Amino acid sequence: MTNPIETQIVAMGGGGFSMEPDNPALDQFVLGLARRENPSVCFLATASGDAESYIDSFYAAFRQLPCRPTHVPLFARTPDLTTVLLEQDVIYVGGGNTKSMLAVWREWEIPPLLRRAWESGTVLAGVSAGAICWFETLLTDSSGTGLFPLAGLGLLPGACCPHYDGEVERRPALHRLIEQGTIASALALDDGAAAHFINGQLANIVSSRPHARAYKVERVNGQATETVLNPDT
């Protein structure tokens, strides 16, 4: 009998090559979860509009790591997405405008491909927009009108908020949404903190720097309360 395939997602509140170019801890953690040595890693920079500088930074960082990096453009000539995405060991999603990213992905019918890749053992990972997109509900500032909830891809349950300590309005905005009953609870991730999910369940929290934390934020007696989820490594 073959062992069942584990599904894995790593959601980074901030950090990785784009925010901590001299600290590859989170990116190395992601690579260490891949099903084979020297894994193929595909970068999706859709949320940035496939910004050339962002893609260049990805290659500069990942060519120094034990992997085979590539990327998929959606604002230039786009390859056959089924072939490319389903052959990856890791799919790494960058930050930017989450609402626009999801709209473009849906036009290209990428969400079902990501699910198929995930269910076949591909590690899904990402930072900021690339962290929150996997959840049922994501908390984004994509419109510039403050933090608001948006439907995500639904691979993970609940809601998620990145940059919890990195952007001054994040914590009070999330607390307001919870106290108003707009959302019941959320996973909040500091910059440098990442949540690792196995088979849809939170398995551990990892951190690239001291004091980076993850929190379960929920409403208790009408007030938003935080439970710290301490990093394991």
Image (spheres, rainbow, N blue to C red):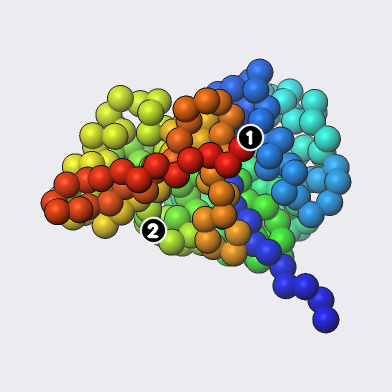
Q: Quadrant of the C terminus?
A: top right
Q: Closest to the observer: 229 or 106?
A: 229
The extreme bottom residue here reads 1
Residue 38's x, y, as percent? 85, 42
- Residue 163, disc: none
Residue 35's x, y, as percent? 79, 54
Residue 193 seen: yes
Which quarter of the figure has residue 162?
top left
Judge whether 194 appears above or below 19 on screen: below
**Which badge, 1 or 2, comes first in the chain's sequence?**
1
Q: Closest to the observer: 158 or 138?
A: 158
Q: Closest to the observer: 226 or 184?
A: 226
Q: Image point 35% across, 26% down: which residue?
A: 167
Proximity of marks 1 and 2: CB atoms separated by less than 8 Å: no
Judge whether 25 appears above or below 2 on screen: above
Q: Image point 23% across, 34% down: which residue?
A: 172
Left or right relative to 78: residue 231: left
Q: Image point 54% across, 44% down: which residue?
A: 205
Of helix, strand and loop, which one carries label 1? helix
Residue at label 1?
Answer: 26
Label 1 amino acid? Leu
Left or right relative to 49: residue 178: left
Residue 9's x, y, as percent? 59, 52
Q: Distance between the residues labelled 1 and 2?
A: 23 Å
Q: Image point 40% across, 26% down: which residue?
A: 166
Left or right relative to 164: residue 77: right
Label 2 amino acid? Gly
Residue 223's x, y, as percent? 17, 47
Residue at label 2?
Answer: 158
